[in-house]
Image: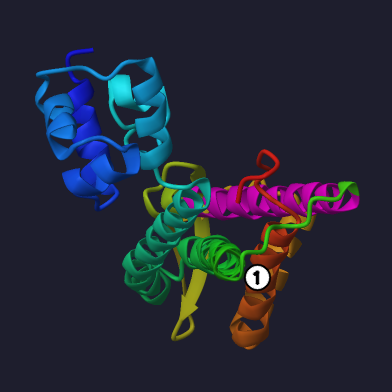
């Protein structure tokens, strides 16, 4: 209670009002308002209600102080989307030279595949969702809230999650097998017979065990990688549209009335 005067002054300054302005609206003298703010006197309940109406605040704010300003849910989602885009972008730029070196020196494509079929598509999906959210906020539009839209969003989200889980698993498995082959951890030494200038020689070579990845998962990995490399612009446009569609269908779901 002892901070009522301080709270009145804070709310008044936030509204850009002087003591004279507030006094005029309350039909009291400026000295009365000054006494309220300095604590020399306290307004009664009826006066608190009038002060709250003038300052557009409730009695709770006058007694306990203004509530801290909070970011709107739409702004928070926009910030999170931008942060995730930045994270995917940093991973993309940081891992690309490493993947290029591994592919050129050791002929390893696991990390390259991870960049092209996981990280980069995620980057553009997040970009599409964030851009759609930004445009929606600028135009004052909200995602579709109908039942069919929520169902469509759920189906699209499930398909996207299944896709990314499969290709991530495939890429990581390929990277593990390549690392094991490089360090001779998984496999066996076999005799290899070679012929040089008509002379046959026998030497030992490391034969890695085959990767334990189903053929259909390998196809899922190879096909989009080929399409991504051959048609990068349409493929990136498709992933951006997917992100925009997720926003349009309200993914991630939120309470009604919130952006």
Residue matched to label 1: 239
- Magenta residues, start to end: 148-176
Q: Nearer the viewer, residue 37 or 144?
A: 37
Residue 20 colored in magenta in the image: no
Label 1 Cα neighbours within 10 Å, binned few <14 / some 14-19 / many ≥20: many
Q: Element under label 1? A: helix
Residue 159 drawn in magenta: yes
Q: Is residue 187 above or below residue 78?
A: above
Coloured how? rainbow
**Residue in the picture at 90% in, 51% down:** 148
Residue 186 against residue 134 in the figure, above or below: above
Q: Residue at x 61, y 86 (%)?
A: 233
User: Splitting the image into 4 quarters, where does residue 79 fall?
Assistant: bottom left
Residue 224 at what x, y percent from top left? 69, 71
- Numbered circles on residues, count: 1
Spot occupied by residue 14 in the image (x, y as percentages of width and height):
26, 47
Residue 189 visible in the picture: no
Foreground pick, 216 / 255: 255
Q: Residue drawn 40% across and 20% down?
A: 46
Q: Nearer the viewer, residue 57 or 182?
A: 57
Image side of residue 36 versus residue 236, left or right: left
Please give left or right for residue 245 compared with residue 64 in the image.
right
Residue 61 is situated, as x and y percent measured from the top left of the image, at: 35, 27
Q: For the view shown, which residue lies furthest in the top direction?
A: 1
Where, quadrant-wise, is the N terminus in this rendering?
top left
Residue 247 visible at all: yes
In the rendered image, residue 4, in percent from the top left (x then y), is placed at: 23, 22
Q: Nearer the viewer, residue 105 or 71?
A: 71
């Amino acid at each position: 209670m002892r901070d009522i005067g301080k709270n009145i002054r804070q709310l008044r300054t936030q509204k850009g009002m002087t003591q004279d302005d507030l006094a005029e609206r309350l039909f009291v003298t400026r000295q009365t308002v000054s006494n309220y703010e300095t604590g020399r006197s306290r307004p009664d309940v009826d006066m608190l209600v009038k002060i709250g109406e003038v300052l557009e605040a409730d009695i709770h704010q006058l007694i306990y102080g203004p509530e801290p300003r909070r970011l709107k849910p739409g702004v928070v989602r926009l910030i999170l989307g931008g942060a995730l885009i930045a994270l995917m972008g940093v991973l993309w730029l940081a891992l690309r030279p490493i993947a290029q070196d591994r592919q050129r020196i050791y002929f390893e494509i696991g990390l390259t595949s991870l960049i092209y079929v996981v990280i980069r598509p995620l980057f553009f999906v997040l970009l599409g969702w964030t851009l759609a959210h930004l445009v929606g906020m600028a135009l004052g539009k909200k995602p579709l809230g109908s039942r069919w839209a929520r169902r469509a969003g759920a189906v699209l989200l499930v398909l996207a999650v299944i896709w990314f889980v499969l290709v991530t698993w495939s890429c990581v498995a390929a990277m593990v097998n390549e690392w094991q082959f490089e360090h001779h951890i998984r496999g066996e030494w076999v005799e290899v017979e070679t012929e040089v200038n008509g002379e046959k020689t026998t030497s030992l070579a490391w034969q890695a065990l085959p990767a334990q990845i189903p053929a259909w998962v390998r196809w899922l990995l190879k096909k989009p990688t080929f399409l991504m490399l051959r048609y990068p612009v349409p493929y990136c446009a498709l992933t951006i549209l997917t992100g925009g569609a997720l926003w349009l269908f309200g993914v991630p779901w939120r309470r009604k009335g919130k952006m």
